[in-house]
Amino acid sequence: IMADTVVLIAHAAQATGIQQFSFRGRTADPFAEPELLTVAAAFARYAGIDLLATIRNRTGDRAALAAAAAGKIRISDDDTWSDLFSKLLVEHVEPHLGQGRLTVLYEYPSPEAALARVKAGQPEVAERFEVYACGVELANGFGELTDAAEQRRRFEQDMTEKQRRYGERYPLDEDFLAAVAEMPQASGVALGFDRLVMLASGAARIDQVVWTPPAGER
């Protein structure tokens, strides 16, 4: 799926005569060999953090990541492991991705892959990837989790956290969980067409290329 996504992006560029993507002064060659980079390697390179050391099996260790991120991002008392991960990704990692060529960022930490299966033999990471160009995320894909019991455990964990933070929880989607139990092995990807058009056209904002303008704009 990772390879197919890169080829699809290149075909889209070729079909429309685009030689390079551009966004706010950054460029990326859609035909160049892409950079393959694990999330752990990206955090080590651009944030100076051993990300996997802050994960216990499939659960993020908030205290460990907060200590590693001290002085790098603004940390709030109610930030979860995922909140800290997202801040570090946006502020320190994403701006460096997809520069000159596409970057395929893969092996996301398990706490950031709610619907993806974990990697065999390495449960702290999951079979999830994203494709970047010019620092912009273009695609998000993963190997589908087809273990209904594991999916239920993740949903219940999410609801427990929602209860802690917001004082409410919702019933689990039993129809979805039943479908997961019957689902064959599969993987898939979602490619943001509007983002692809933005980079191909050199637009500065995504609202310049969407089909209809946001409410209140003409």
Image (cartoon, rainbow, N blue to C red):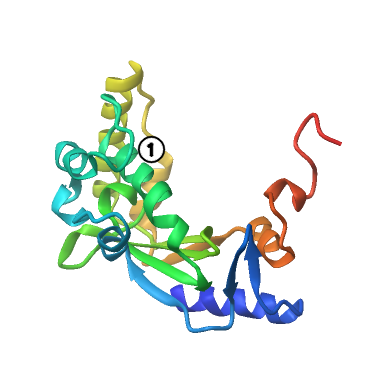
> Is residue 202 visible from the viewing direction of this image?
yes
Query: Image height check: is 39 above or below 19?
Result: above
Residue 137 vs residue 43, the one in the foreground? 43
- Amino acid marked by disc 1: Glu
Residue reaching furthest right?
218
Query: Where is residue 138 drawn, in percent x and y?
Result: 55, 61
Query: Image height check: is 57 above or below 144?
Result: above
Q: Is residue 215 left or right of residue 52?
A: right
Query: Where is residue 177 drawn, in percent x and y?
Result: 36, 44
Badge 1 element: helix
Q: State the residue position of label 1.
A: 174
Residues packed near mark 1 inside 10 Å, few (<14), some (14 to 19) or many (20 plus): few
Q: Residue at x 35, y 70 (%)?
A: 37
Q: Is residue 22 left or right of residue 92?
A: right
Query: Where is residue 215 drawn, in percent x and y?
Result: 77, 31
Query: Where is residue 50 drawn, in percent x and y?
Result: 18, 56
Query: Image height check: is 74 above or below 204?
Result: above
Locate residue 31: give its quadrant. bottom right
Q: Residue at x 53, y 83 (%)?
A: 32
Locate residue 133: give its quadrant. bottom right
> Is residue 56 visible from the viewing direction of this image?
no
